[in-house]
Amino acid sequence: MFAAIGYDWRRHLPTAQMFRRPLTSKLQETNSYFTSFEQHVLEMVDERRALGAEGIDKGDLFSNLIRASDAEEGNARLNKIEMLSNIHIFMLAGHETTAHTCLACLT
């Protein structure tokens, strides 16, 4: 939802300047997670774009987001931040839904 209005979650990552002292190991780990997640997603986007250039379309949500970010129409286009934010939200939402479904099946 936030990504649809251009929400950039990266600007809320903790920095040493915010606390005026070095970050704790947990905050450093969190920053590292977001940075590595972004790099991983960008690699996946490049791979999926390469498949699209070969005419292979998987027809899934990820492909649709990439296609929307590559759209040539002005307002329909997703910028890099919007695309990354949407992918992040869908990854978390998918994990949450799967975890709750598995829990419901086991109880």
Image: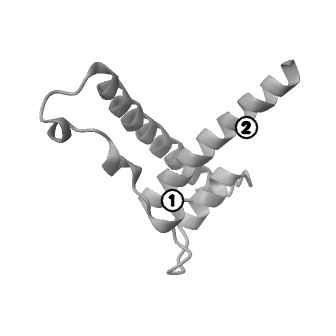
Identify whether 82 is placed above or below 92: below
- Which quadrant would the N terminus be assigned to in this image? bottom right
Three-letter code for the amino acid on which mark 2 is drawn: Thr
What x and y, as percent, mark residue 93? 65, 42
**Looking at the image, can residue 79 be seen?**
yes
Q: Quick one: label 2 or label 1, which is nearer the N terminus?
A: 1
Q: Is residue 85 left or right of residue 22?
A: right
| Residue furthest bottom in the image | 74
Residue 97: numbered disc: 2
Residue at 50%, 59% (x, y): give it. 3
Look at 35% across and 30% down and name the residue there. Answer: 32
The numbered mark at residue 2 is 1
Per the image, label 1 sits on a secondary structure element best described as loop
Q: Position of residue 22 (x, y in %)?
A: 16, 27
Q: Decide which of 22, 71 is in the foreground and name it.
A: 22
Task: Tell me if residue 54 can be seen.
Answer: no
- Tell me what residue is drawn at x 85 percent, y 18 percent: 106
Number of the label disc, if any, that sits on residue 69:
none
Task: Mark 1: give few (<14), some (14-19) or many (20+) Cα within 10 Å.
Answer: few
Q: Residue at x 45, y 36 (%)?
A: 37
Contact between labelled residues 1 and 2, with CB atoms less than 8 Å apart: no
Q: Is residue 41 above or below residue 106?
A: below
CA distance separating discs 2 and 1: 19 Å
Residue type, mark 1 in image: Phe
Left or right? Give the position of 104 relative to 3: right
Q: Nearer the viewer, residue 16 or 88?
A: 16
Quarter holding the C terminus?
A: top right
